[in-house]
Image: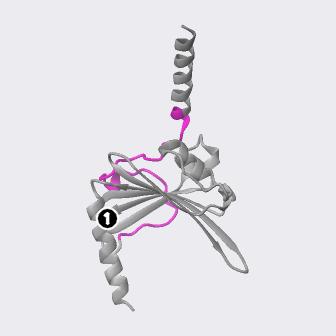
């Protein structure tokens, strides 16, 4: 009986914690840019390959998750279909996006001899609908040190559109040299 009560209370607490978590996926993959109702930080115009990105402060979407304050949320559309969502966190001096990703998608294993704040690399997950990547990078030179964290979700259903877009863009960039 006591175990049942503990189980019920534990399930309730986990459910409440998840309810307060940041739900940054405010539209579905494949949706048109017209369905997105956010304030864009930068003016957005489609590029020559039919790609368009809307960037907005994550704070406007996830008001209850102050640990991610200062992050940007990017919605990337190709041929007017949402194909990628990214959370971008630059020079924040923490690994809050890593912690968020670990809680939402699963643990990130870091070698024992490396401090969490010094770890760089890519960790990937996959679910039924998405490919998910967490990227941590530190750029150092004699004058500065830039730290960036990115959480990237790509739709499996629309990945061909996304890949073809990137191939066309890469081909064009190479032709410019």
In the rendered image, the quadrant that contains the N terminus is top right
Who's the residue at 34% across and 72% down the image? Answer: 166
The residue sitting at 37% across, 83% down in the picture is 173
Q: Quadrant of the C terminus?
A: bottom left
In the image, is residue 13 above or below residue 59? above
Left or right position of 60 against 127: right
Please state the horizontal and vertical placement of residue 41, each as a whole percent of the image: 52, 62
Which stretch appears magenta? Answer: 18-46
Query: What secondary structure is the magenta-colored segment mainly?
Result: loop
Say how many tags the image has: 1
Q: Is residue 124 above or below residue 100?
A: below
Q: Is residue 22 left or right of residue 67?
A: left
Secondary element type, mark 1: helix
Query: Does residue 80 appear anywhere in the picture?
Result: no
Q: Position of residue 172 (x, y in %)?
A: 33, 83
Q: Position of residue 142 (x, y in %)?
A: 73, 81
Q: Residue at x 39, y 52 (%)?
A: 36
Which residue lies under the disc numbered 1? Answer: 162
Residue 108 appearing in the image: yes
Front residue of 137/73: it is 137
Residue 11 screen position, x and y as percent: 51, 23
Would residue 134 be counted in the magenta stretch? no
Q: Nearer the viewer, residue 52 or 174?
A: 174
Say above or below: 168 vs 105: below
Q: Quadrant of residue 92?
A: bottom right
Question: Horizontally, is 47 left or right of 9 in the view?
Answer: left
Label 1 Cα crowd, 10 Å radius (few <14 / some 14-19 / many 20+): many
Q: Which residue sits furthest right?
A: 143
């Amino acid at each position: 009986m006591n175990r049942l009560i503990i189980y019920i209370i534990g399930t309730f607490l986990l459910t409440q914690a998840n309810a307060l978590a940041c739900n940054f996926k405010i539209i579905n993959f494949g949706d048109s840019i017209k369905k997105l109702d956010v304030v864009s930080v930068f003016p957005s115009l489609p590029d020559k390959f039919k790609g368009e990105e809307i960037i907005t402060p994550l704070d406007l979407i996830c008001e209850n998750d102050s640990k991610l304050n200062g992050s940007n949320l990017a919605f990337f559309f190709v041929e007017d279909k949402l194909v990628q969502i990214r959370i971008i966190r630059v020079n924040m001096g923490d690994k809050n996006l890593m912690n968020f990703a670990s809680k939402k998608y699963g643990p990130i294993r870091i070698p024992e001899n490396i401090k969490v704040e010094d770890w760089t690399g890519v960790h990937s997950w996959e679910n039924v609908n998405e490919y998910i990547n967490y990227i941590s990078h530190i750029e150092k030179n004699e004058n500065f040190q830039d730290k960036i964290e990115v959480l990237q979700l790509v739709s499996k259903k629309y990945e061909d559109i996304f890949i073809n877009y990137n191939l066309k863009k890469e081909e064009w960039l190479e032709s410019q040299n």
